[in-house]
Amino acid sequence: MAQSRGNFVQGLQIVDGHLYVSTGQYGRSQLLRYHMADGSLDLGRPLDPRLFGEGLTVMGDKIYQLTWKSKIALIYNKADLKGLKWFRIPGEGWGITNNGKELIYSDGSDKLHFLSPETLQINHSIAVTENGEKIDRLNELEWIDGKIWANIWASNRIVIIDPHSGNVSASIDLQGLLPDNERRPDTDVLNGIAQDPADGTIWVTGKRWPWLYQIELVPPLQTAPPNETHYE
């Protein structure tokens, strides 16, 4: 599916036939909503030029959008993308998703924070580990089938995280997904994960990528380490 190469994608989610996109960069950050059927733009809202947009998640009748270094998050009305309020977060905002009850966000570290949508306070946090080692730079997040999928910033890898233990149960290698001939000088890293609840398909993209890709997980021939599955 084609998308605008101008979108510095920071967050994705598919809800009710619409693709919600958060884009970054100072003076260019936006909240956008597209029709999944044909990729046409439905609505868009620019952020204050002092804010750098990051991840987003749609929960109920609201949209939550993080900002990078401003230590604030924004809340919108889902129906018309009208801004409702903002609230403070302790540090940087990177990626955000939800489990239907709590907001879950990353701050660039190895931590994932679970936030109450009622109090807008952190209920608890978990540390993400892979084979006993901390995994940081957790960026765009998506809740899929009871697990948290996370882009690792500046890599071609997505990890699948147990939301209770923080352990990485699987790793997805997307090296080469965007062909070299589709890259331009300003093409940036893989970033963006969304599952379409209508059919369960999984879509990924990157910053200033021309395409939104539907992916399927295929285990490689080699044996994976114990307790972890690798996909290509």
Image (tube, rainbow, N blue to C red):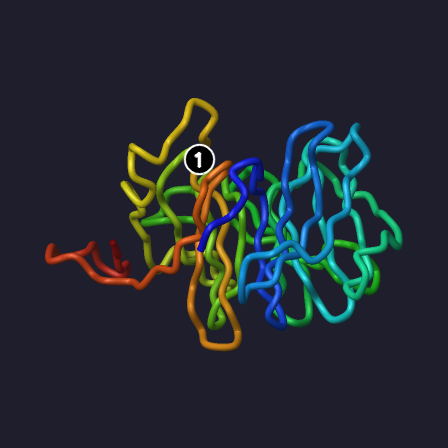
- In the rendered view of the protein, which quadrant contains the C terminus? bottom left
Question: Which residue occupies 48% across, 67% down?
Answer: 144
Q: Position of residue 142 (x, y in %)?
A: 53, 59
Q: Position of residue 68 (x, y in %)?
A: 68, 35
Estimate how packed mark 1 is, as few (under 14), some (14 to 19) or many (20 or more) residues with alpha carbons within 10 Å: many
176 lies above or below 229:
above
Question: Which residue occupies 78% across, 41% down?
Answer: 72
Instruction: Tell me where residue 133 sits by quadrant.
Output: top left
Question: Which residue occupies 39% across, 50% down?
Answer: 158
Q: How many labels were placed on the picture?
A: 1
The answer to whether 119 appears left or right of 126 in the picture is right
Question: Which residue is identified by label 1?
Answer: 189
- In the rendered view of the protein, which quadrant contains the N terminus? bottom left
| SS assignment at label 1 | loop
The residue furthest right is 84
70 lies above or below 19:
above
Label 1 amino acid? Val
Q: Position of residue 225 (x, y in %)?
A: 20, 54
Of residues 49 and 166, the one drawn nearer to the viewer in this rendering = 49
Of residues 194 and 181, the one drawn nearer to the viewer in this rendering = 181
The residue furthest top is 185
Question: Which residue occupies 41% across, 56% down?
Answer: 167
